[in-house]
Image: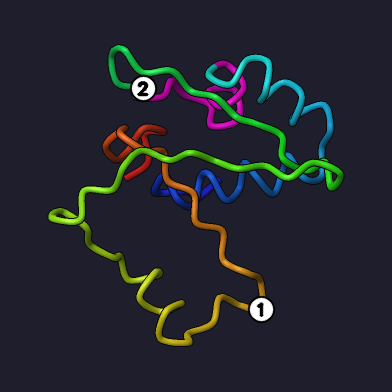
Amino acid sequence: MNLNNDQEILQSVVKKAWKDPAFKSSLIQNPVVTIENFLGHPINLPTGKNLAFVDQTDSSTIFVNIPAELDMEDMELDEDQLDVISGGTNDGDPPIYIKPVNSGDNIFGGN
């Protein structure tokens, strides 16, 4: 597995959860162990932080996420986000932008 940053890792996790119901169930019930097994190494979850995955695939339910308040003074887009905004493509797949809030970077131990 050649995943080198949290964004790529989370994209791979979501894609696997879409295809593998047992993996998705495990991810929801025991996210840290499931991610560590998926990666083959411990993750760098900051002290005092929890990891949770929520299954939002039920089309009969409208899910609303209440995110942390944005710090507009410290907001910066990465290259992938700038590409999407400027009309760049992502190999035909819709972009999956998932970033844990208030966690810092490199939770999953990528480069």
Residue 57 position within the rendered picture, expressed as x and y whole percent measured from the top left: 78, 43
Residue 6 position within the rendered picture, expressed as x and y whole percent measured from the top left: 42, 44
Q: Give me the residue at 66% from left, 71% from top.
A: 93
Residue 54 position within the rendered picture, expressed as x and y whole percent measured from the top left: 65, 31
In the rendered image, residue 39 lying in the magenta stretch gets the answer yes
What residue did someone put label 2 on? 45
Q: Could you say which is closer to the camera, residue 89 or residue 77?
A: 77
Q: Is residue 2 above or below residue 45?
A: below
Which quadrant of the rendered structure holds the N terminus?
top right
- Give the class, few, some or many, for how many residues have Cα within 10 Å of label 1's Cα (few <14, many ≥20): few
Residue at the left extreme of this rendering: 73
Structural distance between the alpha carbons of marks 2 and 1: 32 Å
Residues at marks 2 and 1 touching, judged by CB atoms closer than 8 Å = no
Q: Give me the residue at 34% from left, 24% from top.
A: 44
**Which span is picked out in magenta?**
33-43
Q: Is residue 97 above or below residue 67?
A: below
Which quadrant of the rendered structure holds the C terminus?
top left
Q: Is residue 86 above or below residue 14?
A: below
Q: Give me the residue at 75% from left, 29% from top.
A: 23
Three-letter code, disc 1: Gly
Three-letter code, disc 2: Leu
Label 2 secondary element:
loop
Residue at the bottom extreme of this rendering: 87
Q: Could you say which is closer to the camera, residue 49 or residue 63?
A: 63
Residue 76 position within the rendered picture, expressed as x and y whole percent measured from the top left: 22, 62
Disc assigned to residue 92: 1
Q: Earlier in the sequence, mark 2 or mark 1?
A: 2
Compared across the picture, whether 37 is left or right of 3 comes to right
In the rendered image, residue 97 lying in the magenta stretch gets the answer no
